[in-house]
Image (cartoon, grey):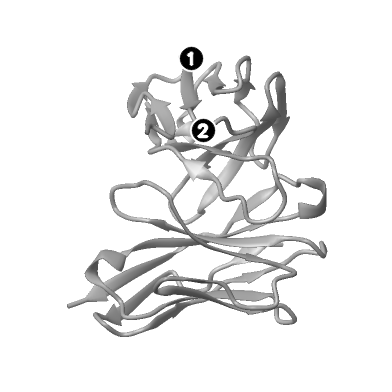
Amino acid sequence: AQKITQTQPGMFVQEKEAVTLDCTYDTSDQSYGLFWYKQPSSGEMIFLIYQGSYDEQNATEGRYSLNFQKARKSANLVISASQLGDSAMYFCAMREGLDNYGQNFVFGPGTRLSVLP
Amino acid sequence: NAGVTQTPKFRVLKTGQSMTLLCAQDMNHEYMYWYRQDPGMGLRLIHYSVGEGTTAKGEVPDGYNVSRLKKQNFLLGLESAAPSQTSVYFCASSYLGQGGTPQHFGDGTRLSIL
């Protein structure tokens, strides 16, 4: 079974509007972390935001926020006030077994976001 | 401020040839990783290392070998390249630690096997 599911292969959003990229995950661990990375067309992987399984508040980093719903096992990325430079692939990833310094990182298939002028 | 550096950036090989991809990091990270990225499949972990002299298999290790003789370097080897190994390869590193220690990625190596 897929550990990370991103059901939106592609998304379009109008510039200055907000957009939500979906991510659901599957784990039996109690301690895990969820990450979002951005990959622009130039190819590099850029870390955006992190949410720990024990964090009670949703993570925020500038225009990025993570809508974490633990019971539903979802960790959606919200980008507010989209900019043309936000056009990229976005990957959701999970690190399991944090209590034991676990190193099993699993990535989802990604969502390609296109911001329209 | 180099971060994670991968060499080469591009390479074309013939089936059966061998080669080594080099990853170097200057952040004193304990952990290092090799991933491959194929269209529609995201990143898949090939091998990783939790410290100098140690390596472990990831999700797709077959056909690859790795070595971590120095803390700052992580080598990925293809002994007999196959067309199925055509991919973009990413190296990453991270600190030892619990919680939200993100991985820092290199810029990738685009490898084509003919």
Name the front one of labels 2 and 1. 2
Quadrant in which the C terminus of chain B is drawn: top left
Within-10-Å neighbours for mark 1: few <14, some 14–19, many 20+: few
Quadrant in which the N terminus of chain B is drawn: top left
Corner quadrant of residue B61: top right
- Mark closer to the chain start, 2 or 1: 1
Q: Is residue B91 above or below residue A108?
A: above
Tell me the tag on residue B61. none
Within-10-Å neighbours for mark 2: few <14, some 14–19, many 20+: some
> Where residue A25 sits: x, y (%)?
67, 68
* Residue shown at 25% from the left, 64% from the top: A85
- Report which residue position mark 2 lands on: B27
Chain hosting mark 1 = B
> Where residue A97 sits: x, y (%)?
78, 53
- Report which residue position mark 1 lands on: B18
Left or right: residue A89 compared with residue B48? left
Cα gap from disc 2 to disc 1, whole angstroms: 29 Å
Given the image, on which type of amino acid does mark 2 rest? Met
